[in-house]
């Protein structure tokens, strides 16, 4: 079975008033020594946020018992799924696609005014992000992302409350030069489309490729956190230092080894500089080319 769905805590969140929208957090994850530390920190943040639903997707052909146990302990309403990359770049594309498939197939269990946020498992999230920014999104909210060791901060440029451009270290003239952690989207908007990540995103950035499929324009964007002279940064890119790869006796303790990187992952590292034909040729070397994301999530 290609997609595996496992237990979730209680039931899917009931419809809620517009002023108490459910935040639906989508998190791709993959086995590595740092993963349980990262997920533990993220879970400790999310469990403090009211009215939240967490969709976690394993980069594998089955879910992981250690992650399933961790999710159950949190008490957070969640669904835990799994899929391999199936000819797509190893950047969480297939995992986010599966999460969106799940939400589309279960859209009646959510409210159209709920909000979707893509939260990687290794970022740092200020609690204010969820209630002061994400829950207030009507169509698409955007905000600054801290990037230590790189550009330090990337953010929308705002004039009179409107997004007029982007403060970005790389190609700031893109229509949506935002980071995956720097936006959230209306649930009804997303599930009413087939927007997904595919090889057609070659030559583009994943954020821009996905957002353009939603037929959004800059006039739809709602900027947050730009008003004051001392502007807060409520989400940070961070990375736990990788552990050594050599095997080590775990003595029965619950930890994970690093999985070897697939060769296709290395070849797709620069997909934003490739043509669709080049990306398709790489995918064909390793198996069937991924079609548009329209897959049923199996129980």
Image (spheres, rainbow, N blue to C red):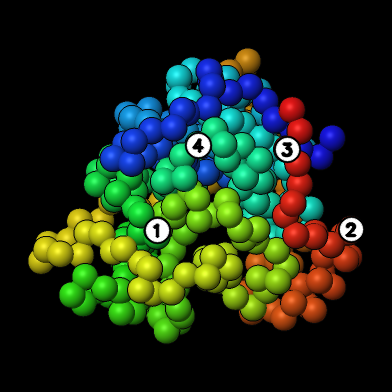
Describe residue 90's horizontal placement relative to residue 155 as left or right.
right
Precedes in sequence: disc 1 or disc 3: 1
**Which of the two discs, 3 and 2, labels the residue nearer the N terminus?**
2
Residue 48 in sight: yes
What mark, if any, has residue 110 been given in the picture?
Answer: 4
Q: Are marks 3 and 2 in contact (CB under 8 Å)?
A: no
Instruction: Assess whether mark 4 and mark 2 are in contact (beta carbons under 8 angstroms).
Output: no
Count how many numbered circles sit on residues in the image. 4
| Residue that mark 2 sits on | 287
Q: Local crowd at mark 1 within 10 Å, few (<14), some, or many (≥20)?
A: some
Task: Tell me the element at label 3.
Answer: loop
Q: Is residue 288 left or right of residue 37?
A: right
Question: Circle 3 sits on which residue?
Answer: 297
Residue 31 in view of the camera: no
The residue under label 1 is 139
Residues marked 1 and 2 touching at CB (< 8 Å) = no
Instruction: Tell me which numbered mark, 2 or 4, is placed earlier along the sequence.
Output: 4
């Amino acid at each position: 079975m290609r997609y595996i769905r496992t237990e979730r805590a209680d039931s899917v969140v009931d419809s809620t008033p517009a002023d108490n929208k459910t935040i639906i957090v989508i998190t791709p994850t993959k086995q590595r020594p740092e993963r349980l530390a990262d997920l533990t920190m993220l879970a400790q943040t999310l469990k403090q946020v009211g009215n939240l639903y967490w969709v976690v997707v394993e980069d594998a052909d089955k879910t992981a018992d250690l992650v399933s146990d961790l999710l159950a302990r949190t008490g957070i309403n969640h669904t835990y799924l799994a899929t391999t990359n199936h000819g797509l770049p190893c950047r969480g594309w297939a995992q986010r696609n599966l999460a969106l498939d799940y939400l589309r197939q279960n859209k009646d269990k959510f409210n159209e005014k709920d909000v979707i946020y893509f939260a990687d498992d290794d970022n740092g999230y200020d609690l204010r992000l969820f209630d002061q920014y994400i829950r207030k999104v009507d169509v698409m909210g955007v905000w600054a992302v801290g990037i230590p060791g790189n550009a330090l901060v990337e953010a929308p440029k705002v004039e009179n409350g409107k997004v007029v451009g982007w403060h970005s270290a790389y190609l700031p003239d893109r229509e949506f030069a935002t980071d995956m952690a720097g936006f959230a989207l209306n649930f009804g908007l997303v599930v009413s489309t087939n927007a997904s990540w595919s090889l057609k995103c070659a030559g583009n950035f994943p954020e821009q490729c996905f957002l353009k499929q939603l037929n959004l324009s800059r006039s739809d964007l709602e900027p947050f956190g730009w008003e004051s002279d001392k502007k807060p940064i409520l989400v940070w890119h961070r990375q736990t230092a990788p552990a050594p790869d050599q095997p080590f006796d775990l003595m029965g303790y619950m930890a994970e080894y690093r999985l070897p990187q697939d060769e296709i992952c290395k070849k797709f590292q620069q997909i934003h500089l490739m043509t669709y034909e080049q990306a398709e040729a790489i995918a064909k070397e390793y198996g069937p080319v991924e079609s548009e994301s329209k897959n049923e999530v199996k129980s």
